[in-house]
Structures are given as structure tokens and as C-alpha cells.
Amino acid sequence: MEKVSEAVGAVVRETITVTDNVTGKSLELPVFHATEGPRVADIRRLYRDMGILTYDPGFTSTASCESEITFIDGDEGVLLHRGYAIEDLAEKSDFLEVCYLLLYGSLPNAAEKADFEQTITMHTMVHEQMRTFFSGFRRDAHPMAIMVGVVGAMSAFYHDSTDIHDPHQRMVASHRLIAKMPTIAAMAYKYSIGQPFLYPRNDYSYTENFLHMTFEVPCADKPISPVLSRAMDRIFILHADHEQNASTSTVRLAGSSGANPFACIASGIASLWGPAHGGANEAVLNMLNEIGSKDRIPEYLQKAKDQNDPFRLMGFGHRVYKSYDPRAAVLKKSADEVLDELGVRHEPLLELAMELERIAQEDEYFQDRKLFPNVDFYSGIILRATGFPVSMFTVLFALARTVGWIAQWMEMIEDPVQKIGRPRQLYTGKRRRPYVPLDQR
Ligand code: CMC
């Protein structure tokens, strides 16, 4: 048997038979062959034909959608965007080119690249009234709290790009989000330190412009370091997309109900904030500071291994990668180089991180569970050296991941089998029972 399913583009080459040992009923389910990666059984008929639901907390065995954007081979430590290896993109490409690749499916030619850069550049300013929106926040608000609020509020400012059924409006919303995210992120930072907001400058590249709005002040010229700009751009590339992670799935789920793209991306930012996900980069730095010195590493490893202690080694482990996260490998390699070029001759936290990694890698607990450093382990050290406060780390992740979220959201809207995401449950609560009046309880 070999046919292309009517529902999805993947090829069906075989079936899997499910037998209910209680009723004796059997059901033959198609199995899709992915371009790469594990085969996928199509269980959509399971409930309709057999009345059985599947139980998969954390979605460890569930393919929630069909996607052509990003592929991860967790055992081999491979990450591809539209077929291109992350190592190649990090070394040879730039962030806006990767944005184009994720959004449109192929690398741009020179004219397409120039056109895309021009389009994004033309959308970098935010509505002037958004400036006053910021003053509603406390000065000590976490910048991620500001991001969730302000990005969600974009739906109230850009009404002409909220009709999700109009492909042109969808694309305008995508461009606006990619273009305005650095502006909003820089404003969140400036607000927290009490400095005036800076307008974007269209003569700068995407990343230079972000650094300009973040680190420059209106009263003095402070040239943007090309080293810093390149390091930042590479960090953006490494965070651009990562298939169906928690925040991306959140964006898709929010979008499946027909919510507008700004609201969907705000929901992605909220999901990213948690320390098990994007918030880990902030948590890694806090953890390294808490450990403080190499002699305390064993104590913290012991805590991480203790099942009764909620402490986990932040920046370690991954749901999909059971080998070295290729993004962490790129960052580890460039950490020294970047610090050196930034003039940081000696970074005790980097040395501590490397020693922590070395000792953890020799430990049976981490070996048995295949726990390796993930992208968040080394990114924080580079970000700190570039001058960002720890509270901004997850904001930078959100800035870069916006293109991944939006590309996945677009793909979902255009998917003919798309319907509202509505999981079921394994109910273990009380059966129906009579209401008890207050005086009889
Ligand atoms: N430190 C200590 N033990 C760990 C860790 C860790 N960082 N990560 C997993 N384990 C253990 C876990 O206790 C479990 O042990 P056992 O089998 O004895 O119960 C085993 O490894 C499997 O872990 P899990 O919780 O079932 O794995 P998961 O796929 O549900 O969780 C994770 C993945 C990333 C949430 C988790 O590894 C973790 O909490 N890591 C620390 C936070 C972190 O660095 N997050 C960033 C992830 S990468 C970037 C991103 O997504 O934004």
C-alpha cells in the first residue's frame, strides 16, 4: 500500500492494527512516513470507530500537526530549518535571511533579500500611543511581563492586520511582529532603567538597530560594536524556531480558535517565560551565581539528582535532544571567541559553567538520562558579557522566536486539515451525584 493521504501531504506506506481486547474489535490505522524522523500513526479514527481516547500527558508521543518548517533529530543532535543545518545558518547566514527562510520556505535571492529587509525596516516604528502604554507598568516590572502586555496590545493598535482569513493581512501582521519586536523589547528595557525610548534607525541592520535602541542614549553617540552585533545576530538565529515546543504549541493552539496573530504571539511569550522553557537562560545565570565557585559544584549536582529536591540543573536536559543540543554546541564554541572579542579576558562564570558541564557529563545520573547542556546553558554567559541584565535574557529569546511562532501560525492557518485544538481527558473525578443542601453537609 502506498498512497498520499487526502488529509496530509505525508506518504502512507503501511498500517498499524489496534485491537481492543475487551470488545475484540480491530482497527487498521494508516502510518505516515515523515520526510525524516519517526513514522506517525494516524489515530484520528480511534475515538470515532472504537470509542477510545489516547492518554499522552506532555505530548511525548503525539505529533500535533504536519509541518515543513523545522526538523530535529534528538538522538543525533540535528536541527534543520527548511532542510538547512543550524550550524550552517549560524555561520553563513544572518537573522533576517533566516526569518525569510522560515516564513517563505527557501533562502532569498539577492533581490528578495533586499526587498524583505526593506519591508521589515519600514515597520520598525511602533504606534506613538504605545509609548504611553508603557507608563502603566511599575518600573520594576519584569520585562517579560511588559512584553506579554504590550505585544497583546498590538491587536488594539493594528486593526488592519488582524483578519486572519486575509492572506495579505496575515503577511502584514507577520512583518509587523518581526519588525516591532526589537523596538518593544528595547522599550521594555529602557523603561526599566528609566532612560528615554529611542526611535529605530533604518540605516542600521536589524540587529544593529536593536542594539542601538537598547544601549544608546539620545545625548551621546555610542557606535554599535560589529562584534557585538554579529554575536547577537547569531544568538537570534539559534533561537529562531524549534518545531512544536511549548510556546509554539501555545501559539498554534491559541491561533486554532481564530484569535488574531498579536494575541497568539502574546500567548507564546507567556508560555516561553517559564523556567522549564525560555526562562531557563535567566535561571542558568541565577544558578551559576548561586553556586559561586567550583568547589560547590558537587553539592548542587547532588541536589539536582535528589528526587525529593525540586532543584534541577538549569540549562540541562531536553525533551527531544538525547544528545548535545547543536545550538549549545555553537554557543559553547563561540562563547570564548565572543568574550575575547568583547575584551572579557577572564569570565569566571564561563569557567564555572564548563566545569559544571564536565563533572555532570561524567556522572552516571546525567549519562543514564542523556542529559546534556541545552541552548540556554551558554547563551546567558554571552548575553551577560554583552551588557544585558539577566531579566532581559528571555525577552531576547522571545524576540528571536517570534519569527518561528509566526511561521508556524501561518502554516497552521493555511493547513486544510486545521481545526480548533481541543484535547480530551482521562476523567477520574466523581461520578454524577445529587446536590446536597447546605444544612445537610
Ligand atoms: N536536572 C536534573 N535532572 C533532570 C533534569 C535536570 N535539568 N532534566 C531532566 N532530569 C531528569 C528528571 O528528573 C527525570 O529523572 P527520572 O527519570 O529519574 O524521573 C529524567 O531526567 C527525565 O526528565 P523529564 O522531566 O521526564 O524530561 P522532560 O522531557 O519532561 O523535561 C526539561 C525536559 C527541559 C523540562 C527538563 O530537562 C528540565 O527541566 N531542564 C531544566 C530546564 C531547562 O534547561 N529548560 C530549557 C530547555 S531547552 C530550551 C527551551 O525549551 O526553551
Image (cartoon, rainbow, N blue to C red):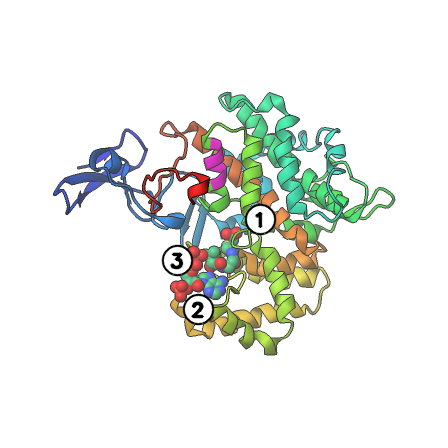
Nearer to me, 71 or 160 = 160
Indicate the amino acid at tag 2: Phe
Please tell me whether the stretch drawn in magenta is mainly helix, strand or loop.
helix
Nearer to me, 22 or 281 = 22
* Quadrant of the image occupied by residue 266: top right
Give the residue at the far left of this rendering.
24
Residue picked out by circle 3: 76
Circle 2 packing at 10 Å, graded few (<14), some (14-19), many (20+), is some
Using the image, tell me which numbered label, if any, was put on residue 273. Answer: 1
Q: Check the picture and name the quadrant holding the N terminus.
A: top left
Tell me whether circle 1 and circle 3 mark residues in contact (CB < 8 Å): no
Query: Quick one: label 1 or label 3, which is nearer the N terminus?
Result: 3
Where disc 2 sits, the SS reads helix
- Provide the residue span drawn in magenta: 250-255
Question: Within 8 Å: ligand 1 and the Cβ of disc 2?
Answer: yes
* Quadrant of the image occupied by residue 130: top right
Where disc 3 sits, the SS reads loop
